[in-house]
Amino acid sequence: MLTILTHDILPVFALLALGFLLGRRGVFGRQDAASANRVALMVMQPGLIFLVIATVPFADFELRTLLTYGACEALAFGASYALARRAFGCETLEAWLLAMSVVFVNSLLYIRPIALLLYGEDGALPVTAVVAWDTAVAFAFFIISADLIARPSAGPLPALRRLAVNPTLSAILLGVAVNLAGLTLPEPILTACRFAGAATAPLVLFALGVLLSGQSLRPSAVVTTYAALKLVGFPLLVALAVWLAGASDLWQAQVSLLAAGPSGAMAFALALLHSIRTDRIAAVTIWTSALSLLSLAALA
């Protein structure tokens, strides 16, 4: 456990922590991080997303396990959203994104690099499968739904026009089309996607650390509740559900590992994008990123 923590998990987490530390010291400011984050998400991440989705072997997935994970996401999301609205009185979009922080794990940019270090490219298929699911289905759902909630009066057509030029959604759709068509990507395209994709996780994690350094760490009732739901409630639900679904040992272990990961940065990014309250979502992201270290090491 200690070896896994020091050799595979801490090196990935260290970039987020370094960004947080340098942000607190004023070496990098919010504008620096926002610009770096924008470049990573708009330019580099689409290449990584396209590569993962276009090349992942859909036929090798344990479909029942993957659908069970998706059902757990839907159940936990609905319960978390209702709790935020009724118990804590959060505004609609903040409650929506708090619930997102419970079920949308930092899988592509945090758990997947750890899984590749632990299991290698071929051995990390279950994690890659959930990354593909979260990217192609859950991520797209939250981008679209947050946009519609934030601009309810604009109507669906303006939203569709905005989303049509979103590079992440375009990469998802193109990757699915290439995969389903059985096309073989030319080596130069693979090289370009790998080259851009390799920089995505380090840059986003560092920028996220800088952005979060300006947020309060105070563990309020909302923050404590949603960090606990993310780190304890959701992983337990997923582990029990995939076991009952008859998942193989490899898929059960890796899907449970992924569910125990920290909240994804996109809930915070969407809150920034739509100019809503960010302090509680940011604190959940910070606390789950720090507190998940030991649980990830134990599960790995």
Image (cartoon, rainbow, N blue to C red):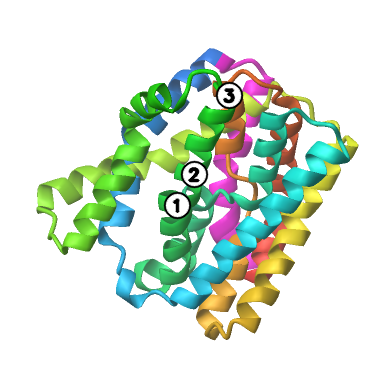
Q: Which residue is mark 2?
A: 141
- Residue marked by disc 1: 137
Residue at 68%, 49% in the rendered image? 102
In the rendering, at what x and y percent does residue 220 appear? 88, 35
Q: Quadrant of residue 203?
A: top left
**196 magenta-colored:** no
- Rendered position, 116 above or below 204: below
x then y, percent, for residue 207: 53, 29
Q: Residues within 10 Å of mark 2 (few under 14, many from 20)?
A: few
Marks 3 and 1: CB-CB under 8 Å? no
Q: Answer with left or right where residue 229 lies relative to residue 54.
A: right
Q: Amino acid at mark 2?
A: Phe
- Residue 224 seen in this snapshot: yes
Image quadrant in which the C terminus is located: bottom right
Check the image and report above or below for 123 versus 6: below
Q: CA distance from mark 3 to mark 1?
A: 20 Å
First in residue order: circle 3 vs circle 1 = 1
- Mark 2 to mark 3: distance in Å? 14 Å
Q: Residue at x 40, y 68 (%)?
A: 120
SS class, disc 3: helix
Measured from the top left, where is residue 227 in percent x and y? 77, 47
**Amino acid bearing label 1:** Val
